[in-house]
Amino acid sequence: MGIFGRKDKRGTDLEGDWQSHTGYFSLHDIHGDGPNYEEWDRRLERADRHAAAIRPKTRWWQPSDWRNRRKRWWFVRIVAALLAIALALFAWLALTAPLSKSLEPIVPPQVTLLAADGTPIARNGAVVAEPVEVAELPPHVVEAFLAIEDRRFYSHLGVDPRGLARAAFTGVGGGSTITQQLAKFTFLTPERTLTRKAREMLIAFWLEGWLTKDEILERYLSNTYFGDNVYGLRAASLHYFYRKPENLTLAQSAMLAGLVQAPSRLNPAKHYDRAERRMRLVVGAMVAAGYLSETEAEQVRSPRLDIRPSGNLPTGTYFADWALPEARKLTGSGYAQTTLTTTLDSRLQRIAGRVVSSAPLGSAQVALIAMRPNGEVVAMVGGKDYAKSPFNRAVQARRQAGSTIKTFVYLAALRDGWNPDDTIGNTEITEGSYRPRNANGRYSETITLRDALARSSNVATLRLFNEVGSEKVIGTARDFGIEAEMAKGDPSIALGSASVSLINLTAAYAGVAGNRFPVEPHAFAQEDEGWFEWLTSSRQSLSTARHEQIEEMLRAVVNQGTGRAAMLSIPNYGKTGTSQNNRDALFVGYAGGLVVGVWIGNDDNSPLDGISGGGLPARIWRSFMVQALGNDVAAPGPQPVGTSDPGGEVEPLDVPDLGEIPIGDGRATLRIENDGVIISGDVEGVPIDITLGEDGLQVRPRDTR
């Protein structure tokens, strides 16, 4: 049919007079009169429209469509795409690298911790001072840094290709601009990769777009590292020359500018010759940059250091390491050095250190933590020697609690309606897959809850656990803040198989001592709880009756049970604990407003040699308490009875005649006589007597007649 009977997109009839045309045109149709000529134009126009309508269309994904584009089209769209990517990257930076980070010091500033009485106990963090302002610095200070680090700082846009080339060929100046260096140590890690370098350049462009040149330079000078744990120009000028940066001389400025390349290697306090050579290089760079003349450079003399001694406080202790994260939250971000007063009692801390160091621990490690019932930590020992091992065993180690966890089994029973005088079976367990035995091997038909806790009966505790139910026991432990993992239905948790930190366990006992739980241990004094906070608090308390009952049971542990070695003359409460195979030995208790936990164990979790919770840990606990609360709290020994002289002969040793006692394999004997102790035996066939009496030690042949 061809084009006849067709219409274009606009609906124009394309057939017209063509339908009856024979397909031939004569010349007079072209050169004829006007009307015929116009008709011919109309026909050609309709033919063009028809051809355009039937031409095959190309789509954007077809190669022919792209080949038909003009170069100008390509250029405009590529530029638009690059701008869109740049805008997207800048938006991403605005979200992921906030500009405010460049206002903050790149390391936490120095924090000095004080004991509760104001005694400095530790200092931690970098030496950081207030930021500098370019407008207040002498010109030679700024010029020294620009000459050696970034000569074209005020003319480039964050990245300097000429500076990169100069650094590569001459070795003078850094390859990165000051803006790039600020971007690197403010926003990025020190890794050396092309990806990090690309991000560094991108952030540099971003910083240049948001900050003035002086603002960038100020932030750079206020954060860069100068060695000796000193950050920022102000802190460095005070540290090395004991003067403000506004008063630095040319030589001092040049030496400080030279340190930036390698602060530790060029540290003038340790390697003055290296720092001096680097200073000369900076002066030469200032001449090359046009800041100094040759004559002025020759007149520069090496500066004299003026490093003032500072207080020699330890940068780390067990308590300081634990308290520092909390201190950082209190100080926030900023350049100011901060001094904070902690809850640590310097007197109690010295007592703790003295008691631990004098204990016969052998190769075992030890931890001690003392706190108030409200959670204020007043003493902390995390090991025998911080210098050898800063690992804090009072906080970081999680070890089996042993029988100290039994307190919360019996608390769960009291909360469930049991009483200290109620009885529970104490016979040996012969059925089931879990058959613990009593450590002393003693059993009975029944035993009261009071005596079961005092004697630390394993079988009675397990039966009580089964009676009360694991959910209630675990719930009680959680209420008091115990964070150990406890599987529901696992009977071994009743005997302390779960692992817990000493500070967490001691805080749980603090909840018992103050009858307000859970207790959160803290290193800084907290505001007293107001009545509204008290009403809305999620913390709990036992009823007065239940609290008295658990204290009665814990006191029985000390007075007549496994904790007798911890007995004081004042009411004291506690519980011993020994984990499986004697891997951990503990005593946790309270008296006189102090809650103290002691742990002994080996770091490799190997068994202890003859140490149990009722032995050395209880004695360490008592020794600490006696010194902390005063010698008058020590349990009194037998008192002399005043009587008249009974007369008669005096027995020097006041012991009955025991006869001869065999020693060793029986070839030697020991006997007690009026003049002392006599050991009789043979030495290479010669019978001798060794006498220890009022005349000292005597060795003489034995009369065998």
Image: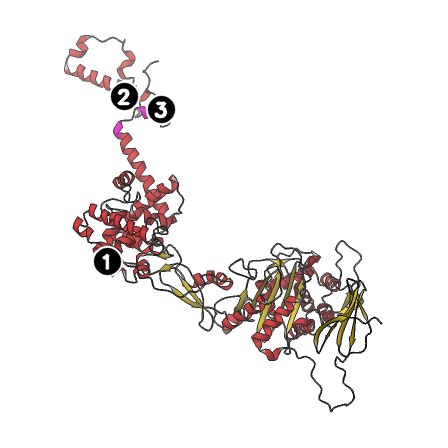
Observer-side mark, 3 or 1, equals: 1
Q: Measuring 81% from the left and 72% from the top, which residue is drawn there?
A: 703
Asked if 32 appears above or below 79 in the picture, the reply is above
Name the mark on residue 49.
2
The image quadrant where one finds the N terminus is top left
Name the mark on residue 249.
1
Colour option used: secondary structure
Kindly identify the amino acid type of the residue bearing the numbered disc 1.
Thr
Residue closest to the eye, 32 or 527: 527
Residue 584 in picture, x, y percent from top left: 65, 60
Residue 405 in picture, x, y percent from top left: 66, 63
Q: Is mark 2 on a helix, strand or loop?
A: helix
Lower sequence index among marks 2 and 3: 2
Q: Magenta region's main secondary structure? A: loop
Marks 2 and 3, how far apart at CA: 26 Å
Part of the protein shown in magenta? 55-72
Marks 3 and 1, how far apart at CA: 69 Å
Kindly identify the amino acid type of the residue bearing the numbered disc 3.
Pro
Q: Residues within 10 Å of mark 1 (few under 14, many from 20)?
A: some
Q: Measuring 36% from the left and 42% from the top, which residue is drawn there?
A: 197
Q: Quadrant location of residue 336?
A: bottom left
Q: What element carries label 1?
A: loop
Q: Is residue 249 left or right of residue 604?
A: left
Q: How many marks?
A: 3
Q: Is mark 3 on a helix, strand or loop?
A: helix
Q: Quadrant location of residue 557?
A: bottom right
- Which residue bears the numbered disc 3? 63
- Circles 1 and 2 in contact, beta carbons < 8 Å: no
- Circles 2 and 3 in contact, beta carbons < 8 Å: no
